[in-house]
Amino acid sequence: MRLYQLIDGIAATSLPDTEITGLTSDSRNIPEKGFMFVCIKGATFDGHSAAEKIAAAGASVIVCQRDLGIENQIIVEDTRAAFPMLCSAWFGHPERELKLIGVTGTNGKTTITTVLKKALTDFGKKSGLIGTCQNEIGDEILPTARTTPEPYDLFELLRKMADAGCEYAVMEASSQGLEQKRLGPCRFTAAVFTNLTQDHLDVHGTMENYYQAKKLIFDICDKAIINIDDAYGRRYISEIHCPYTTFSAAGKADFCAEDILLSASGVKYVFSDGVSKHNVDFKMPGLFNVSNSLAVIACCETLGFQPEAAIKLLNRMQGVRGRAEVVPTGRDFTVICDYAHTPDALVNVLSAIKGSAKGKVKCLFGCGGNRDATKRPLMAAAAADNADFLIVTSDNPRNEDPERIIADVLKGLEGKNTPYITICDRREAIYWAVRNAEKDDIIVLAGKGHEDYQILEGGQKIHFDEREVVAEALAALE
C-alpha cells in the first residue's frame, strides 16, 4: 500500500509517497525494510525509545507523537489513536462492510454475545463473534488472546469476517479496549450495557474511572440498549447523548420480564415490549440470566427482527460454555463450572443455585494474581454468604505467591460461620471436592469458566481444563 493512501485523513507528511510493506507497533518484532512503525507509550514501555533502532533496521516510516530527530518520521498528536485508524486503512476499512454490535459491562458479555450471534445465524445472517472465550467467523472457531483484540489483530479479524461474507460482527467491548482506543473508527449499530461491579480496579484505579471507560462506547454507537436495574445504567441514560432503549428484570422498562420463575435448571418469564408478550424458557439459572436473555431479545428487536424469533432460539438453547455449565458426573451430585470472578458474579451464580438446591452448595474459588487485590476478601464474603461450604484455592497466581493471595482472601471470612478448607493446588482442590461430595451436593467451580489453562506462580502457563480434571477425579474414585 502506498504511504499517502495509508495515512489519508489520519496524518500529513512531505515524505516521498513510498510503498509500505507492513504495519506494526510491536518493537519486539523489528520490521523489515518498507515497514511503518508506530511508537506507542504503554504502562511499562514507550515505543518512542526504540524508534531510532527500528529506523536503522530499515523501517520506511516512523509514526511518533514528538520530534525524535529521525529523517523519516511522521508526527501525529496521539499515536495510540492513530494506530487503529492506520490498521483499519491497512485492511481496507472492513468495519464499514459490517454491522457491528458491541456489548460492554462487568458481567454477562460472553453469554449475551454468544446467544446473540446464534440468533443472528438462525435469522440467516452470517455473523462473526469477538469475545473472551473465542473468536468465530461463521462456523469457523479461532483462538483469542484477549476480550477486545489489539488494533492490528482486530481489523485483520474484521477483514476476514467481511471477506467470508459476514453481515454482522458481535463484539465484547472491554473497558481497557475502549480506553486504549483499540476500536479506532469502529461504529456500533447497537451497543448493550449489562452492569458495572468492582473489577479491573488494578487498571482503572477507581469505580468512577471504570465507569467513564465503559461510557466511551456510547460515543461510537447509533443506539444504546441499557440495563436500568443497574445504578450505573440509570446514570448512563441521564448522561449519554445517543438514542437508547432500556431493559429490566425488576421493573418497568422498554423491554421487561414479568412473572419470573427461577430454578436450578434455568429461568422462565413473560417477555413484554409494551406491544406483545411471549413466554421465555431459558435454560441458564439465575436472575442475571433473565437480564442477559432480555438484552438479547431487546437487541434483536432493535436490529429489526421479531422478538418471538429470538425467543424461540432462547427456548432451544442448552447454555453457554463456562457460564453456569453443568459438568457431567454420572453421580448423585452435581458439578457446575462458572466464570464468576467478581464478588457480584459469585453472589449471582451461588444465590441462583442455592435457591433450589436439595443438598449443600459447595463453592471452590480463588483470586487471580497481579489483579485488583481489594476484591479478594469481598469474594470470600460473597461466597460465604451464599454457599454452605467453601474450598479456597488458587486461580491464576501469575507473579504472586498463591499462599499470600489465599491469605488475602481469608480476611473476608473473619466473623463468618461458613466452614471452609484451603487447598492451594487447584487440581488437588477439585479432587478433594469430588472425593468428599455427598448426595445432592452442588459443587460450583468458580473463576475459570471457559478457560482451559492456568497461569502459575512465575507466569508459567499450563493446560488446565476443569472438565478434564473433574473426569480424572471421578475416574480416581473408581
Image (cartoon, rainbow, N blue to C red):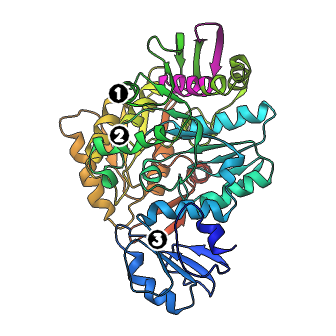
Distance between the Cα atoms at labels 2 and 3?
33 Å
* Residue range highlighted in magenta: 271-298
Residue 327 in view here: no
> The N terminus appears in which quarter of the rendering?
bottom right
Residue pointed to by mark 2: 211
Q: Is residue 3 left or right of residue 204?
A: right
Of residues 52 and 194, which is closer to you in this image? 52
Residue pointed to by mark 1: 235
- Residue lying at the far left in this picture: please name it: 415
Identity of the residue drawn at 46% across and 32% down: 349
Identity of the residue drawn at 47% across and 37% down: 218
Disc 1 secondary structure class: helix
Residue pointed to by mark 3: 460
Q: Is residue 368 left or right of residue 291?
A: left
Coordinates of residue 143 in the picture (x, y in percent): 64, 58
Callout 1 environment at 10 Å: few (<14), some (14 to 19), or many (20+)? Answer: few
